[in-house]
Image: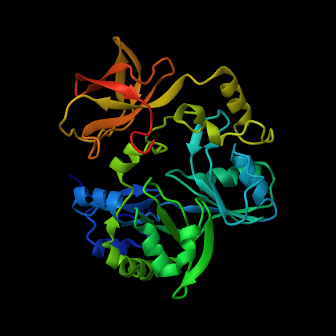
């Protein structure tokens, strides 16, 4: 095991001190920030998410703010999803693409006003991309990284915890809708969202100096429900079929290959970045698609941390892009990015540590279909 050497290019989140106090034992870097990835008991952290309620420091989901007269136009130029019907206080999942139709990020776009948007981004410097596109198009818009840091509350008891803080109105908040409010003078946007299939909220802290205070409020409200710290859980996300941009995608992956075709509207304006290429891909059909793979054996293997070749009938057909031991399925599972000729039910072999491990392809998600 190795440690991350501190330096001025890696920032702490507003919740960092609280996570250390809560017992964080490991961190990774994401959007040039530290994100907790464990608190010393992976088994308990998993089941807390599945059966109870967990709180996560996900401030690394940085908010790229588009503000100004042309903010809505820039948001649409960046997104191949039609945003014309997006309401204020509504979010939409979007697949940002480059000019070749390759996915370069998959943020949640949140509309705060007709002239103000946030892009809640995955691990990529979209700030620079958005600024470059805005300048190249001559748009009247300011693009900044806002002082906004999400704290997630996830799990089947999340509604009870968040309702104890803000009131029962949160129970009727629709998916990807949000409301701006305050708690003890701390400004937040409460959104029904989060990177799990277990349900929950993200509390968008809008004052970075109040991170520990907000963490403590959530922890105290969650105490009757046995809340505890956690993080975007790799086992639950694979079981639930959630895409990890940059982990399950490469430098040629388009939305149609990874189950995001529903988030591409081919009739958006021609000036949307990547839409000509996406129309061409849709017309000819993608060459790959994303399936699940279940490996034989009933003993946990180490997580898959690099793409592994998948073979069928002696021929390489693609790659296994992630892999975990599923605590609910009692099997080693992962995602497969493979030729469209490969189908669910096909027997395959995964090349791992010089050996071919037999398995079979399956539909996604594994659980919660």
- Residue drawn at the location 52% of the way across and 25% of the way down: 288
The figure's colour scheme reads rainbow
Q: Is residue 314 left or right of residue 1?
A: right
Q: Is residue 319 left or right of residue 96?
A: left
Total labels drawn? 0
Q: In the displayed structure, would residue 101 be above or below residue 195?
A: above
Q: Position of residue 57 (x, y in %)?
A: 41, 66
| Figure quadrant of residue 118 | bottom right
| Figure quadrant of residue 310 | top left
Q: Position of residue 188 (x, y in %)?
A: 56, 76
Determine the residue located farthest toward the left in the rendered image: 299
> Who is closer to the viewer here, 295 or 353?
295
> Who is closer to the viewer here, 127 or 41?
41
Q: Position of residue 155 (x, y in %)?
A: 40, 62
Q: Position of residue 339 (x, y in %)?
A: 48, 21
> Who is closer to the viewer here, 76 or 196?
196
- Residue drawn at the location 65% of the way across and 32% of the way down: 100
Q: Is residue 129 left or right of residue 46?
A: right
- Residue drawn at the location 76% of the way across and 60% of the way down: 71
Q: Split into 4 quadrants, where in the image is the C terminus? A: top left
- Residue drawn at the location 78% of the way across and 37% of the way down: 267
Look at the image and tell me whether residue 336 can be seen: yes
Q: In the displayed structure, would residue 110 be above or below residue 300?
A: below
Q: In the displayed structure, would residue 132 be above or below residue 53?
A: above
| Figure quadrant of residue 215 | bottom left
Look at the image and tell me whether residue 14 can be seen: no
């Amino acid at each position: 095991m190795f440690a991350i050497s501190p330096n001025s290019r890696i920032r702490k989140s507003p919740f960092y001190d609280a996570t250390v106090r809560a017992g964080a034992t490991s961190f990774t870097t994401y959007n040039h920030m530290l994100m907790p990835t464990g608190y010393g008991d992976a088994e308990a952290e998993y089941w807390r998410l599945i059966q109870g309620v967990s709180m996560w420091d996900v401030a690394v989901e940085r908010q790229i703010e588009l503000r100004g007269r042309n903010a809505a136009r820039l948001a649409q130029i960046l997104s191949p999803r039609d945003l014309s019907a997006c309401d204020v206080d509504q979010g939409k999942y979007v697949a940002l693409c480059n000019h070749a139709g390759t996915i370069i990020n998959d943020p949640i776009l949140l509309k705060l006003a007709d002239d103000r948007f946030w892009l809640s981004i995955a691990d990529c410097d979209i700030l620079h991309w958005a600024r470059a596109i805005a300048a190249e198009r001559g748009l009247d818009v300011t693009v900044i990284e806002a002082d906004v840091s999400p704290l997630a509350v996830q799990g089947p008891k999340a509604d009870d915890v968040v309702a104890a803080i803000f009131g029962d109105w949160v129970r009727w908040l629709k998916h990807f809708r949000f409301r701006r409010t305050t708690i003890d003078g701390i400004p937040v946007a409460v959104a029904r969202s989060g990177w799990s299939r277990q349900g929950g909220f993200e509390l968008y802290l809008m004052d970075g100096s109040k991170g520990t205070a907000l963490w403590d409020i959530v922890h105290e409200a969650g105490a009757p429900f046995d809340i505890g710290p956690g993080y975007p859980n790799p086992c639950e996300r694979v079981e639930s079929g959630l895409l990890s941009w940059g982990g399950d995608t490469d430098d040629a992956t388009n939305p149609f290959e990874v189950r995001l075709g529903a988030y591409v509207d081919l009739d958006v304006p021609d000036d949307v970045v990547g839409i000509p290429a996406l129309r061409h891909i849709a017309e000819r059909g993608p060459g790959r698609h994303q399936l699940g793979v279940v490996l034989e054996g009933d003993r946990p293997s180490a997580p898959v941390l690099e793409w592994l070749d998948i073979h069928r009938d002696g021929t390489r057909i693609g790659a296994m892009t992630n892999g975990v031991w599923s605590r609910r399925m009692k099997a080693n599972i992962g995602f497969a990015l493979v030729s469209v000729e490969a189908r669910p039910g096909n027997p395959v072999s995964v090349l791992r540590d010089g050996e071919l491990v037999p398995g079979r392809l399956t539909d996604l998600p594994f659980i919660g279909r």
